Image (spheres, helix red, strand yellow):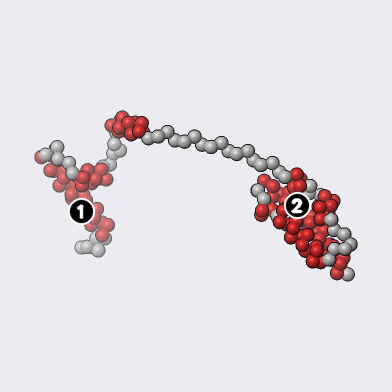
Amino acid sequence: MLFGQSVFQSVVERLNQEAEEQAQEDAVTPHKTTAASFTTSFVLETERPDPERFGAAFDAYLDFLPDPPEPEPEPEPEPMPAYLERTSLADVSDELAIDDKDTVESLSEKRRAFAKLNHPDRLSPEFRANAHARMTAANLLIDQAIKLISR
């Protein structure tokens, strides 16, 4: 703090003093403009500048800019794979082909292979509901088969 003021307050006060001094100098010599006087007068200006004053210059600037690129059309959503439409227990059971000769290891391998193709996290969001239903059915069927083997 400088003399009971924060650094920010002292900077604002100094800018105000410079703006006042510059205004007095501009009254004497109105054609003299420096970057500092323009910056402080612009920062301290309370009214917004007239948009008509900047319209032509801004339009001329825009004429030099290249046209914005056309947005690319959204790609067509991919169709749902046919296997994801089969969500019933019977359909999933046919795909897993569980039989009496399966062991716990072979059933675990079937679960991993099925999950590799059907896990909801590996598919597009619009297909996840069907994938979830298929994974639920497959896990249920494989868990039941493992229980039967364990007996």
Percent coordinates x, y for residue 120 in the rendering: 69, 53
Residue at x 36%, y 31% (from the top left corner): 63
- Residue 51 vs residue 120, the one in the foreground: 120
Residue at x 84%, y 52% (from the top left corner): 94
| Amino acid type of the residue that numbered disc 2 sits on in the rendered structure | Ala
Residue at x 28%, y 39% (from the top left corner): 47
- Marks 1 and 2 close (CB-CB < 8 Å): no
Residue bearing mark 1: 14
Q: Residue placed farthest to the bottom in the image? A: 151
Whether residue 55 is visible, yes or no, is: no
Percent coordinates x, y for residue 56 in the rendering: 31, 30
Percent coordinates x, y for residue 34 in the rendering: 18, 44
Whether residue 120 is visible, yes or no, is: yes
| Amino acid type of the residue that numbered disc 1 sits on in the rendered structure | Arg
User: Would you call the spot at circle 1 few (<14 residues within 10 Å), some (14-19), or many (20 or more)?
Assistant: few
Q: What element carries label 1?
A: helix
Location of the N terminus by quadrant is: bottom left
- Residue 35 vs residue 122, the one in the foreground: 122
Location of residue 77 with respect to 104 vertically, above or below: above
Residue bearing mark 2: 133
